[in-house]
Amino acid sequence: MNRQNHSPDIPDVKPSPARLPPGKVWLVGAGPGDPDLLTLKAARLIAAADAIVYDHLIGEGIITLARPDARLIYAGKQSSRHTLPQEQINALLLTLTRQNLAVLRLKGGDPFIFGRGGEELEALAAAGVPFEVVPGITAASGCAAYAGFPLTHRDHAQMLTLVTAHRKRGGLDLDWAALAHARQTLVFYMGVGAAEEISRQLIAHRLPAVTPVAVVRQGTLATQTAIFSTLAEFPARLRAEKVEPPALIVVGSVVDLHERLSARQHDSVQAMRHL
Ligand SMILES: C[S@@+](CC[C@H](N)C(=O)[O-])C[C@H]1O[C@@H](n2cnc3c(N)ncnc32)[C@H](O)[C@@H]1O
């Protein structure tokens, strides 16, 4: 079954007689990948929408919840390979709502965390289109939980900082001095291509080179892998193991707790997959 539409053409879909009010957009977080991590509200909306505009990080098991006659439009966003420019996605949402469709804008993780959800809502608001936001589990929560370590802990980290490592014009424009503090956890989204810079800058700003680092790839999916290393060594490990996005880089001593916590957790995650 291939119901994906890789072109921005506006489909000729009949508005459904269904329950969702037409002409409205739901901006929905799909979580980090495992369909079991969808909220009930997200699952209900996916199953009812007339049209679903979805991103690269939405897992197969989630899209298959859509109505058989729903129009599925892939809007892409794979690192630097943007399938549809943001302006075209905004315009697409407006056009679909003008066709009186109930439109689901489905994004990986949480739409308000490095998801450009705000930008899309600004366009809808400016055009007077009604919308609703449904939060999702962000990659940081999903990856940490499935890799077996907490993000905060009274003995390790009283602060949690989510950082985008998406490069604009060459380098990262980050306040490294503020980031390089002990007793906090740093989570870098979109950081694989910036691993060397993250390591070099944090060490230069006096975060110990032995600070534990986890890199979790395809977190919460059956294909999840995790590399446990240190601030000094993780870029070389990523190169050696040819790690590609999507991956999350977590820096901080909470990471070391996986040694005690992940074995039993692994069993229970595997057991859940068989439920
Ligand atoms: C554009 S950001 C979107 C973040 C999303 N809105 C969220 O709340 O998780 C994409 C980045 O999120 C991270 N990411 C998303 N899903 C992931 C997953 N399942 N495993 C590891 N990293 C993930 C990666 O760093 C990826 O490059």
Image: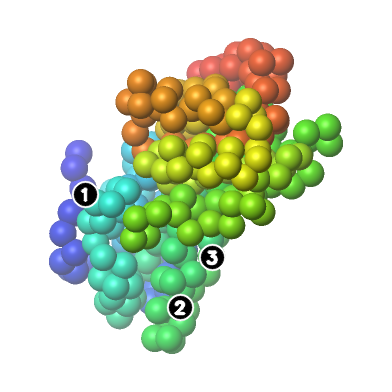
The amino acid on which the numbered mark 3 sits, given as a three-letter code, is: Val
The amino acid on which the numbered mark 1 sits, given as a three-letter code, is: Gln
- Residue in view at x 44 percent, y 38 percent: 195
Where is mark 1, residue-wise? Answer: 4
Q: Quadrant of residue 244?
A: top left
* Residue 231 in view (yes/no): yes
Q: Secondary structure at mark 3?
A: strand
Q: Are marks 2 and 3 in contact (CB under 8 Å)?
A: no
Q: Quadrant of residue 209?
A: top right
Task: Specify whether tag 2 is near ligand 1 (CB below 8 Å).
Answer: no
Q: How many marks?
A: 3
Q: Position of residue 179 (x, y in %)?
A: 64, 49
Where is mark 3, residue-wise? Answer: 133
- Residue in view at x 40 percent, y 54 percent: 171
Q: Are marks 1 and 3 in contact (CB under 8 Å)?
A: no
Left or right: where 37 falls relative to 247: right
Q: Are marks 1 and 2 in contact (CB under 8 Å)?
A: no
How many C-alpha atoms fall within 10 Å of the one at disc 1: few (<14), some, or many (≥20)? few
User: Quadrant where the N terminus lies?
Assistant: top left
Label at residue 122: 2
How many C-alpha atoms fall within 10 Å of the one at disc 2: few (<14), some, or many (≥20)? few
The amino acid on which the numbered mark 2 sits, given as a three-letter code, is: Glu
